[in-house]
Image (cartoon, rainbow, N blue to C red):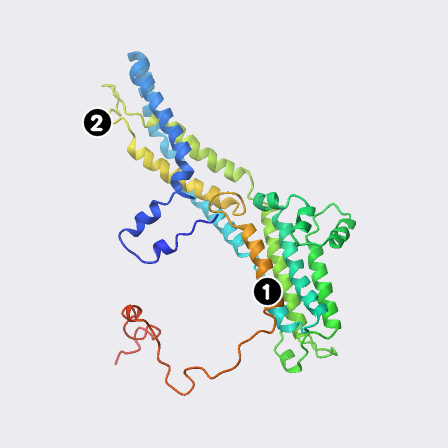
Amino acid sequence: MTVSYNRDVATSRPWTLFRVLMKWRGSIWKSILVELAIWMSSYAALGIVYRLILNSQQRAIFERISDYCDEKMGYFPLNMMLGFYVNCIVDRWRKIVSNIGFIDNISLLVSTYVDGFDEKSRIQRRNIIRYCCLAQVLVLRDMSMRVRRRFPTLDTVVAAGFMLEHEKELFDSIKIRYAKYWMPFQWALALLYDVRHDQKIDGDIRLNRVVDQPYPHEKYPMRGFHLLVKEIITFRKGLGVLCSHDSVPIPIMYPQLVYLAVHAYFIVCLISRQHIVGQNSPKQTPIDVYIPFMTILQFVFYVGWLKVAEAMLNPLGEDDDDYESNTLIDRNLTVGLTIVDEAFREKPTLHADMFWADEIAPLYSAESALQQPRGNVFNGSTANVK
């Protein structure tokens, strides 16, 4: 489930930082805890071997190795590698989330332009929405394990009501080696064509004038039809972006390289960051500290940075902060069918508003009025300069 913390950072206060830092689910602490514990255990074990088990000659060799490793730590370009990698991951994450798909625009256009209160018209409107939701289910069940567990087979999709039995038979009758995500969209567009043929789409010639590509030669102007087709295609393109990002991931060499560099760096740190007790070592520490606090902080920053990219690499996965695909599916079907059926042509009766013949006076509670800024914040900064 996506971790929400917007309410905790609604205002900037000294303790706001601690509210965010104390979160556990989806936090950096949870993501690095196991690896940090393993690294600290390995560091402690190596320190015990160095201090208590090795003889003086062996300790001298270990100290020279530690000095050498410490001198070469700058050879790991972690900042540059992690910076480019995380930037690439964030860009992919943003594209996936922005194309996940909400059914609202299609539903509102269907409700606006597809007319009719009879049973056939209701079925047509509902099926257009259901077919679009079905396409989204078919795409997400092949990309998200959460959705796959919910819909392991097409029979479960039928049982959930996204597809009817005769539609499944038609779906299965098409034998091709590739995914058939396109079929529900084909059904929706074919149904939309039938609706237009039945003249249930508004054909006001005045509305047709504002269409980007008008069709003056058509017997029935196509503004509503044009907008509906365009919106369905836009929805399909968004799902196509998801498919592209899922089938063509970042080349495996890149994450391999970054993971290898970060983990190799801290493996070397097990030796180079040991506190040396030998008298002749150039890296002898003035204070014998058993816990490497600064290296632990570095581990939290670098490995945590890597974990951020790992969590965002597939936002449709099963991490704490991944996208709620099942919730989106349920929401789209419920909202879409409600808009085109229960709320179809529902609107309040017309009455004059409270500002009809009076000056518009903003209304605030006593508490919220005290928080309003002085002056007009939407004027230019030099508007009142004389």
For the question of whether residue 356 can be seen, the reply is yes
Q: Nearer the viewer, mark 2 or mark 1?
A: 1
Q: Residue lying at the far left in this picture: please name it.
A: 286
Q: Residue at x 28, y 12 (%)?
A: 56
Please, is residue 324 above or below residue 335 in the view?
A: above
Which quarter of the figure has residue 65?
A: top left
Please, is residue 301 above or below residue 223 in the view?
A: above
Q: Residue at x 25, y 81 (%)?
A: 386
- Asked which secondary structure carries label 2, the reply is loop
Q: Residue at x 41, y 39 (%)?
A: 30
Residue in the foreground of this view, choosing between 46 and 205:
205
State the mark number for residue 150: none
Circle 2 is placed at which residue position?
A: 287
* Disc 2 and disc 1 in contact, CB within 8 angstroms: no
Residue in the foreground of this view, choosing between 335 and 110:
335
Residue 191 image position (x, y, % from top left):
72, 65
Residue in the foreground of this view, choosing between 376 and 19:
19
Q: Residue at x 67, y 74 (%)?
A: 115
Please, is residue 174 above or below residue 351 in the view?
A: above
| Kind of residue indicated by mark 1 | Thr
Q: Crowding at label 2, few (<14), some or many (≥20) Cα neighbours within 10 Å? A: few
Residue 300 image position (x, y, % from top left):
36, 38
Circle 1 is placed at which residue position?
A: 338
For the question of whether residue 81 can be seen, the reply is no
Residue 356 image position (x, y, % from top left):
43, 85
